[in-house]
Image: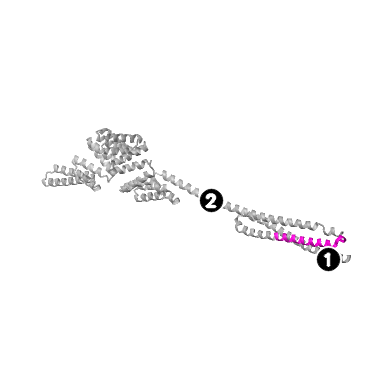
C-alpha cells in the first residue's frame, strides 16, 4: 500500500515539476517581453525628444504600448492562475499522503517556487505600471509639444503684427513730417496698403488731396474714413469744408452739424459752420457759432479773425477792429488778419495805419496777391498812381485769373487816360467773372470817359449807348447778387 502511495505521490510530483517547468518557461518568456518593453520604452523616450516627428510616431507608439500593457496584464493573470492551481493540487496530495510524506512535504512545499513566481509577477506588474506611466508621460509630453508649437505660432504672429505696426507707424510719421504733399500722399498710400483700415491715413490723405486740388479723391478718402468710423467727427468736419468749397453748402452744413453732434466741444467745427452760415446769409447764426468757438477755445485766432470779418460786414467796425487786434495778438504772423485790418483801417480813415498793415501782410506772405491789390487801391486813393500800378501788376502776375485786380487796374488806367489798356483789362475782368457788377460799372465809366475824350459825335453817341447798356447790366447783376 505504501509502495502504491509512493508511486502515486511520485507521479504527482513529476507532474507538478513538469507544470512548474512550463510556468518557469512562461516567466522566462515574460522576462523577455519585459526586457523588450524596457528597450522599446527607451527608444520611445529618445523618439519623443525628436519633436519634428512626434505627431504620427507618438500615436503609433502609444497604441503599441497599450497593446503590450494589456498583454502583460494577461500574462500576470495567467501566472497567478497557474500558481494557484498547482498549489491546490499539492495540497490535495499532501492530504492523501498524510504522515507518510512528512519528510517529503518540506521539500515539496518549499516557498522558493512561490517566491520566485511572486517576484516575477511583481516585476511584470511593475513593468506594466511603468508602461502605463510612460503612456501618461507621452500624452503629457505630446500636449506640451502642442502647446509649445501653438505658443511659437502665436509669438511668430505677434512678432509679424508688431513689425507691421512698426512699419505703419514709421511711414505715418514720415508722412506727417513730409513737406512735399505728393511725397506725403505716396507715404499714406503705403500706410493704407499695409493697413487698409487706417482711418487717420484716409483722413490725412484727404486733406492733402484737397490742398492739391484733387477734390473728388479727397471726398472719397473722407467717405472711407467715415465708413470705417461712423463717429469720426474730424472726418465729418473736413468733408464739410470740402463740400463747402465744392459748392455743396447744404451737404457741408449737414457734415458740420454731425461733427458738432458727435463732439459738442469741437471749436473748429463751430468756426467752420460759422463761415458757411455767413456765406449762406445767416449772419446771426454765424455770429453765434464764432462766439461758441471762441468760448470753447479762447486762444482761437482764426475764430477771432472770422468774427472780425463778419462784424465789419455787419457794420460793427469797432468790434471788428478789436477782433483783428486779438487775432494778431494770438498769431503775430497772421498775414490775412493784417490785410483785413488794413482794409478796415482804410475805411475808418486811418490810411497810414492801413498802409503799414498791408506792408506787414506782404512782408509775411510775399505771394499774397490780395494784399498787393488792396495796397494798390490805397495807394491810388493816396495819390501814388505809380505805386498803385506796380501793386496791381504784381497782384495779376501772382494770380493771372484775379478779375478784381484787372478791374482795379482798368479803373486806374481810365484815370491816367490809357483807354486802350483799360479796355483790355476790363474785358479780362468780365471774362474771368461775368457775374461781378463792379466790372460792368467800370466798363460804363470807361465808355463815359471815352465820350468826353472823343470829338466825333457819332462815336460819342455809340459810347454813350454802350455806357448805358453797361450800367443797366451792372444794376441787374447788383440786384441779383443782393437777393
Residue 296, image x and y in percent?
Answer: 37, 38
Q: How far is mark 1 from mark 2, CA to CA?
A: 78 Å
> Looking at the rendering, in which quadrant would you find the N terminus?
bottom right
In the picture as drawn, the residue positioned furthest to the left comes out as 457
Q: On the image, which quarter does residue 97 sit in?
A: bottom right
Q: Is residue 307 left or right of residue 133?
A: left
Q: Is residue 91 magenta?
A: yes
Q: Is residue 85 left or right of residue 243?
A: right
Q: Is residue 48 magenta?
A: no
Q: Mark 2 = which residue? A: 156
Residue 416, image x and y in percent?
Answer: 19, 40
Graded by Cα atoms within 10 Å as few (under 14), some (14 to 19) or many (20 or more), the crowding at tag 2 reads few
> Which residue appears at 62% of the width and 55% of the height?
139
> Looking at the rendering, in which quadrant would you find the C terminus?
top left
Q: Nearer the viewer, mark 1 or mark 2?
A: 1
Label disc, if present, on residue 478 of the rendered structure:
none
Amino acid at each position: 500500500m505504501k509502495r502504491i502511495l509512493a508511486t502515486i505521490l511520485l507521479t504527482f510530483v513529476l507532474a507538478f515539476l513538469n507544470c512548474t517547468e512550463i510556468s518557469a518557461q512562461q516567466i522566462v518568456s515574460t522576462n523577455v517581453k519585459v526586457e523588450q518593453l524596457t528597450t522599446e520604452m527607451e527608444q520611445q523616450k529618445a523618439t519623443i525628444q525628436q519633436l519634428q516627428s512626434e505627431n504620427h510616431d507618438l500615436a503609433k507608439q502609444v497604441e503599441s504600448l497599450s497593446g503590450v500593457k494589456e498583454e502583460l496584464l494577461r500574462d500576470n493573470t495567467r501566472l497567478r492562475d497557474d500558481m494557484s492551481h498547482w498549489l491546490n493540487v499539492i495540497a490535495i496530495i499532501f492530504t492523501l499522503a498524510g504522515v507518510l510524506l512528512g519528510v517529503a512535504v518540506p521539500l515539496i512545499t518549499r516557498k522558493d517556487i512561490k517566491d520566485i513566481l511572486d517576484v516575477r509577477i511583481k516585476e511584470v506588474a511593475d513593468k506594466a505600471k511603468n508602461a502605463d506611466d510612460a503612456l501618461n508621460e507621452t500624452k503629457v509630453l505630446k500636449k506640451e509639444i502642442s502647446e509649445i508649437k501653438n505658443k511659437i505660432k502665436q509669438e511668430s504672429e505677434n512678432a509679424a503684427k508688431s513689425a507691421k505696426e512698426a512699419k505703419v507707424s514709421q511711414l505715418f510719421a514720415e508722412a506727417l513730417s513730409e513737406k512735399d504733399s505728393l511725397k506725403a500722399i505716396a507715404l499714406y498710400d503705403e500706410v493704407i496698403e499695409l493697413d487698409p483700415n487706417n482711418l487717420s491715413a484716409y483722413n490725412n490723405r484727404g486733406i492733402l488731396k484737397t490742398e492739391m486740388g484733387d477734390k473728388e479723391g479727397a471726398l472719397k478718402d473722407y467717405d472711407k474714413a467715415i465708413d470705417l468710423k461712423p463717429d469720426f467727427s474730424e472726418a465729418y468736419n473736413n468733408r464739410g469744408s470740402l463740400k463747402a468749397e465744392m459748392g455743396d453748402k447744404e451737404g457741408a452744413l449737414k457734415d458740420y452739424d454731425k461733427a458738432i453732434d458727435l463732439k459738442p466741444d469741437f471749436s473748429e467745427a463751430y468756426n467752420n459752420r460759422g463761415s458757411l452760415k455767413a456765406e449762406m446769409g445767416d449772419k446771426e447764426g454765424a455770429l453765434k457759432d464764432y462766439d461758441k468757438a471762441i468760448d470753447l477755445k479762447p486762444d482761437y485766432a482764426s475764430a477771432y479773425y472770422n468774427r472780425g470779418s463778419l462784424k465789419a460786414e455787419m457794420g460793427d467796425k469797432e468790434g471788428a477792429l478789436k477782433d483783428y487786434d486779438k487775432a494778431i495778438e494770438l498769431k503775430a504772423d497772421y498775414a490775412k488778419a493784417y490785410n483785413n485790418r488794413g482794409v478796415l483801417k482804410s475805411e475808418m480813415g486811418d490810411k497810414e495805419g492801413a498802409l503799414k498793415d498791408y506792408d506787414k501782410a506782404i512782408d509775411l506772405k510775399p505771394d499774397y496777391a490780395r494784399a498787393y491789390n488792396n495796397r494798390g487801391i490805397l495807394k491810388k486813393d493816396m495819390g501814388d498812381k505809380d505805386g498803385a500800378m506796380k501793386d496791381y501788376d504784381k497782384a495779376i502776375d501772382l494770380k493771372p485769373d484775379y478779375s478784381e485786380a484787372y478791374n482795379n487796374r482798368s479803373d486806374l488806367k481810365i484815370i491816367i487816360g490809357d483807354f486802350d489798356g483799360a479796355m483790355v483789362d476790363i474785358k479780362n475782368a468780365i471774362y474771368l467773372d461775368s457775374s461781378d457788377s463792379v466790372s460792368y460799372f467800370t466798363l460804363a465809366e470807361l465808355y463815359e470817359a471815352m465820350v468826353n475824350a472823343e470829338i466825333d459825335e457819332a462815336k460819342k453817341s455809340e459810347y454813350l449807348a454802350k455806357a448805358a447798356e453797361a450800367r443797366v447790366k451792372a444794376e441787374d447783376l447788383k440786384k441779383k447778387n443782393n437777393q
